[in-house]
Amino acid sequence: MPERGAFRRCLEAELEQAGEGASLYLVLSGTSEGEPVRHFYEQDGLIARPLFLGTAYSGWHEVMPYLAQIDPMSGFLDWIEETEWGDWGWAAVSMLSFDDLFGHLQSLIKIRMPDQREVFFRYWDARFFGPLLSYLDDQSLAAMMGPVKVAIMPGGQPYQHSGLLPVEKQEPSPWFQLTPEVERQLSGLCWHQLVDATLAELHRINGSPLLSWPPEVARLKVERQLRRLSRGQPITELSQPDLAHLHQCLLQEARKASPIRSSTV
C-alpha cells in the first residue's frame, strides 16, 4: 500500500510548480475492485467522461475507464488517500483542456507491438503504466504523454517529459508502437497480470476446465500452458485464437485426469 499522504503531497507540489492555468485530471480504472468510478460519482462526479465513448467499445460498461477533472480540494482525493487499492488509476496535471486530454487518451486504446500486432493498452492501470513510462526514451515518452505535463502514480511517483516536442493531433488508434526492448521489459512485469487475466477469461467460459482443480493447481496449469504458448517469447496479451487453444489444452488435460480422480474418491 502506498505511503499515506505521498500522493497528495506530490499532487500539490506539481500543481504549484505548473503554475496558473494548470488543471488536475484523474484517469480512473474501470477494472479495479476498489470501484474508483463509483466512489468518484458519490463524492465528486462533476466532470467525467467514459474513455471508450464513441468507439467500438462504448458498450464495455463493466470495465470502462473514465477521465475526470477535479478541483484540488475535491473530497474524492480523501478517498484516494484512504483506499487500500493501488490500482484505482493515476492523476494528470496539464495546461490543456479536458477535450485535448480526452482525445489523446482515446488514441491510446490500442497500441502496436514490435511485430505489428494490435493490443489493448491498459494505460489506466498505474501498476502497468508507471513502469512503462520509465522504460521509454525521451521522444517516446513525450509522444505517449502528449498533453500530460506530469503523470502522478498512486504512490506519489511523478513522471514528466521535457516538453521539447510539440503536441500534435494524433492519428487514430493504434499509432504508438513499442520497441522490442520495452516489450521485453514489460513482459516480465506483466507475467502475473497475464496469468490473472487468463484465469479470469477462462472462468467466464461455461464448463471451464479450471473447475476440475483447486485454485492453486489451476493457476500452475495455466502458467505452464502460457509458457508453452509463448515459447520463450515476450507475451503481454492473449489473442482470442491463443485463448481458445489454451482452453482446449486444459480441457484435454482435465478429461484425462477425471477417471483417475473419480477412482480415488
Image (cartoon, rainbow, N blue to C red):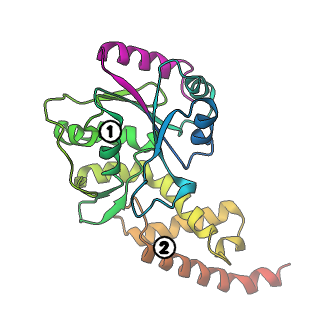
**Which amino acid, mark 1?**
Leu
At horizontal 55% and vertical 67% (from top left) the residue drawn is 222
Query: Mark 1 near mark 2, Cβ–Cβ under 8 Å?
Result: no
Look at the image and give the residue range highlighted in magenta. 1-25
Q: Distance between the residues labelled 1 and 2?
A: 34 Å
Q: Quadrant of residue 124?
A: top left
Who is closer to the viewer here, 58 or 34? 58
Q: In which quarter of the image is residue 234?
A: bottom left
Q: Where is residue 56 in the image (x, y as percent from the top left)?
A: 40, 64
At horizontal 58% and vertical 55% (from top left) the residue drawn is 62
Who is closer to the viewer here, 256 or 65? 65
Describe the element under mark 2 as helix, strand or loop: helix
Q: Work out whether 228 lies above or below 42.
A: below
Disc 2: which residue: 243
At horizontal 45% and vertical 73% (from top left) the residue drawn is 240
Q: Where is residue 42 in the image (x, y as percent from the top left)?
A: 64, 34
**Which amino acid, mark 2?**
Leu
Q: In which quarter of the image is the N terminus?
A: top right
**Label 2: few (<14), some or many (≥20) within 10 Å?**
some
Who is closer to the viewer here, 160 or 106? 106
Q: In which quarter of the image is the C terminus?
A: bottom right
Q: Where is residue 140 in the image (x, y as percent from the top left)?
A: 20, 42
In the picture, measured across the screen, residue 123 lies left or right of residue 107, that is right
Tag 2 or tag 1, which sits nearer the N-term?
A: 1
**Label 1: few (<14), some or many (≥20) within 10 Å?**
many
The label on residue 101 is: 1
**Count of numbered marks:** 2
